[in-house]
Image (spheres, rainbow, N blue to C red):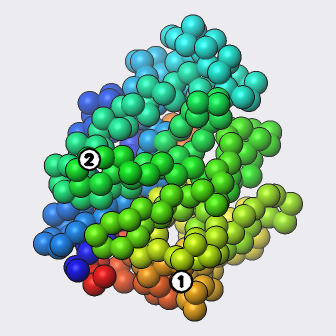
Amino acid sequence: MQLALVAVQLEVTADVLASSDAYQRHLAAAVARAVDTAGPADARLVVLPEVSGHLALLALAGARAQKAKTLAGALASEAMRRPFAVLRGAATARVLEPRSAVLAALAPDAERWWKSVFAPLAKQHRAYIVAGSHFRLSPGGELHNASLTFDPDGRLVATTDKVNLIPGIEDGAKGGLGLFRGDAERIPIVETPFGTLATLICYDGFRCAHTKLERFVPVAPTIAARGGVTVVANPAANPWPWRERWPFDDRVRVDQWEAEGLPGTLRSLRDTPFARFGVTAHLVGRVLDLHFDGTSEILDGGGRSLARADAPDRAACVSATVTC
């Protein structure tokens, strides 16, 4: 079977997120370009970046939020517009922190919108789509960074919660979002005509922790212990400059990613049944006080690049057709 693998390096700007209609058009155009780039194949897998669904909160927000200078300011503006929803969020969320209450209030509507965008796109293009990641509020009030997978009939076939949270950004540390961790043992493995598919959201594709003190679970060996997969999707959003020194050691971020991210993980597990192929899709661009860089790529099971974006700071569709 010929399988087209496509990583959508999605570029986001204030104009793209000016409204839900504008963002939906941007996402639909990106998926259409991805399918066109892939060309004819027996099956297609399109992967979008991490955090792309988080940004739906801005696209769905009111005009006042669009004028904010920071993400925190935009959320505060939206909280003022929907005070009763925020009160419900505070009662629902398991983390008693104002920002978590706002996210808990807004997440369900944003998730419904995210599903309404990608289910039809998967059906329209007859493709498997890993729809980046978004905020998911669980029935128990836990707020997760989660990724949805849709099949070519537009059905939701997997919901994957991120296991490893970035210290000081996603976790419960000061300044973090206070998100809850997923369970590495419960990451869905989807059966498809081209084999099996699992999603490891960004940091979950790493083979080791960024710091010595944080809680970190190597997820890839857990997938290998379950028999491995044909393809691992790796939606990513890197908030550090790609070609500059990153904050945790003296390496340039791209070199650290190559050594410890999905390429390094695949190399370290090349003699185990982890994955035959990997697809990393990066978010790029600037929105409010947020900045993302990264080079999307398609990898073989030994961590070698089959296709890679030309630059880490502009939109791209990266594709490779492989035999499964």
Q: Residue at x 75, y 62 (%)?
A: 216
Q: Disc 1 designates what residue? A: 273
Can I make out residue 311 in this image? no
Q: Position of residue 164 (x, y in %)?
A: 67, 56
Q: Amino acid at mark 1?
A: Pro
State left or right for residue 182 relative to residue 285: right
State left or right for residue 305 relative to residue 23: right
Quadrant location of the N terminus in the rendered image: bottom left
> SS class of the residue under badge 2?
loop
Q: Disc 2 designates what residue? A: 154
Q: Residues within 10 Å of mark 1 (few under 14, many from 20)?
A: some
Quadrant location of the C terminus in the rendered image: bottom left
In the image, 131 versus 25, the foreground residue is: 131
> SS class of the residue under badge 1?
loop
**Relative to 151, is 218 above or below?**
below
Q: Amino acid at mark 2?
A: Gly
* Marker disc for residue 62: none
Residue that sits furthest to the right in the current view: 213
